[in-house]
Amino acid sequence: MKNEPVLTPAGEWYRNRDEWVRHVLGRDYLSSDCQRVGIFIALHMNRRDGHTKHQQTTIAADLNLSVETVKRAVKKLREEGLLDRDQVRRGYRNRAVNHYMLIFPWAV
């Protein structure tokens, strides 16, 4: 297209994130809780390292959901190829923290 603005890498990342949110909202087969969890994760992403570090208990508390509902939603988003997760050990208690990454289906 002519006269289309050139985006910075940050602008490109935010556009992809917003498109991902629209993509998730357009999937009628995903429950509303699943969509809410996905959007929460997307909106809390760190664009510099491409992931978020929120615990499932934090996500559940912020969205007023049970931890089990958050686990099911993350599992469904992973099965659909929209989200990836790494478990990272940290701290003196060696507690696991989930790092969530968005998968942009149009970029695969």
Image (cartoon, helix red, strand yellow):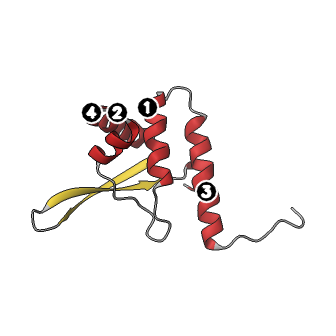
Q: Amino acid at mark 3?
A: Asn
- Left or right: residue 57 compared with residue 20: left
Q: Which mark is residue 65?
A: 2
Residue 54 position, x and y percent, is: 33, 54
Towards the viewer: 55 or 17: 55
Name the residue beneath numbered marker 3: 16
- Left or right: residue 1 compared with residue 38: right
Q: Determine the CA span between mark 1 and mark 3.
A: 22 Å
Between discs 1 and 3, the one toward the N terminus = 3
Could you say whether the residue bearing mark 2 is in a helix, strand or loop?
A: loop
**Above or below for 72 versus 46:** above
> Viewer-nearest of labels 4 and 3?
4
Could you say whether the residue bearing mark 4 is in a helix, strand or loop?
A: helix
Q: Are marks 2 and 3 in contact (CB under 8 Å)?
A: no
**Above or below for 2 versus 108:** below
Q: Quadrant of residue 108?
A: bottom right
Residue 24 position, x and y percent, is: 55, 39
Label 2: few (<14), some or many (≥20) within 10 Å? some
Towards the viewer: 104 or 18: 18
Q: Determine the CA span between mark 2 and mark 1.
A: 8 Å
Name the residue beneath numbered marker 4: 68
Label 3: few (<14), some or many (≥20) within 10 Å? some
Q: Is residue 82 visible?
A: no
Q: Determine the CA span between mark 2 and mark 4.
A: 8 Å
Name the residue beneath numbered marker 1: 33
Label 1: few (<14), some or many (≥20) within 10 Å? some
Between discs 2 and 1, the one toward the N terminus = 1
Q: Is residue 46 visible?
A: yes
The residue drawn where x is 19% and y is 57% is: 96
Q: Amino acid at mark 4?
A: Glu
Could you say whether the residue bearing mark 1 is in a helix, strand or loop?
A: helix
